[in-house]
Amino acid sequence: MKQNILLNSVASIVYPCLAAGLLLITGCRKEKTLDPSEQDENYFIVKDNPDVPADHARYGFYESTGIASFYNDTIHRKRISDLGELPRYSYVTLSLEYSISDLANIKFKLIDNKENIPAVLDLVKQNVLPGLPDQFVIPSIFLIDTFYTSLLLKQVELAHGWTSWHGFNTIGISVQDVTVMNSEERKMYAASILAGIAERRLTKVAGDKLQKDFFSVSRAEAKFFKSMGIDVYSGYPLTFLPPAMIPPPRPTGLLRYTVYGTGEGPREITYPCLPREADDSRAFLTAAFYYTAQEFTALYSGDAFILKKFNIIRNIAQEAGFKLPE
């Protein structure tokens, strides 16, 4: 019994001493210097390929602006391991979704004809970039055929402002054939691209002001829809009304109703709808980037609420740093 007590006493002294000694030795040992892994890479770089005009144009655009452009959403693929006989890869991709909470569900179609890319990049450089705020960061440009949300827009024109989309790590631009456009069409195309970029920017930095000053105008004046409990920016189909009963959009401060549809070709079905907020703001922003205040006033001299909203969104865009025609 005494022997057990003695052993326990010795253990209670020796073990803590050994632990303290090990800690002292470990603490005095020189730590290995931490070196950077060098695994981070900048994938937003464009290399020249003189044999392909589109790639050569992308390289020239990158050299002069510092902005990388791509026509495929997968910009890098790396083999990371093998699972049995099958290789496994990690991918770096461009995303038109802004965040995990973005409900837009943007989809896109890749371009088939890359011949239009050089002229589009030249237009972006000459007519789009100068209209952006100072120090505005474009992470990259994704050149695509078309993009669309869960609702399929139909009869889309440049003036509607649906040729660009500011996503998470890229700005998607719908490639048009600039070579067949006249000077006014090119100007409208650039204005439409700027409108898509500005719509995202203004929603972020001036969302409350847009709601209070801009969207509130049409919400207040759309008395016919308000009487039925329908928000003028609901995107609600107007098919429940006979065409003669649909009130004209301009007296309520809307440039137009939106046309949606399903199907293609002989199976295509189109129907007018109330706009969404983005439909309305993009249309007015395109006008703001295209017209001077004097030109727009002359065009819509009899539409008080159209002019009111134009001047409001013009001021908001200028306050956010966008350059508009004077």
Image (tube, rainbow, N blue to C red):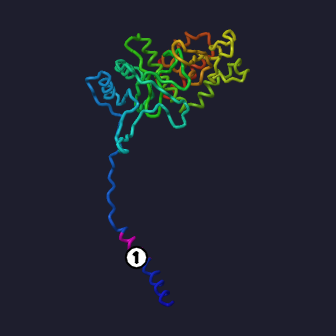
Q: Quadrant of residue 216?
A: top right
The reply to whether residue 30 is visible in this rendering is yes
Q: Which residues are magenta?
A: 16-25
Instruction: Find numbered disc 1 in the image and state the secondary structure of the residue it sits on.
Output: helix
How far across and down, in percent of the image, does residue 284 sit?
Answer: 55, 19
How far across and down, in percent of the image, does residue 193 sit?
Answer: 46, 22
Q: Quadrant of residue 314?
A: top right
Q: Residue at x 37, y 33 (%)?
A: 75
Q: Is residue 124 above or below residue 84?
A: above
In this picture, residue 287 sits left or right of residue 125? right
The reply to whether residue 306 is visible in this rendering is no
The residue indicated by pointer 1 is 18
How far across and down, in percent of the image, does residue 232 sit?
Answer: 65, 22
How far across and down, in percent of the image, does residue 245 sit?
Answer: 69, 11
271 or 81, nearer to the observer: 81
Say whether residue 268 is magenta: no
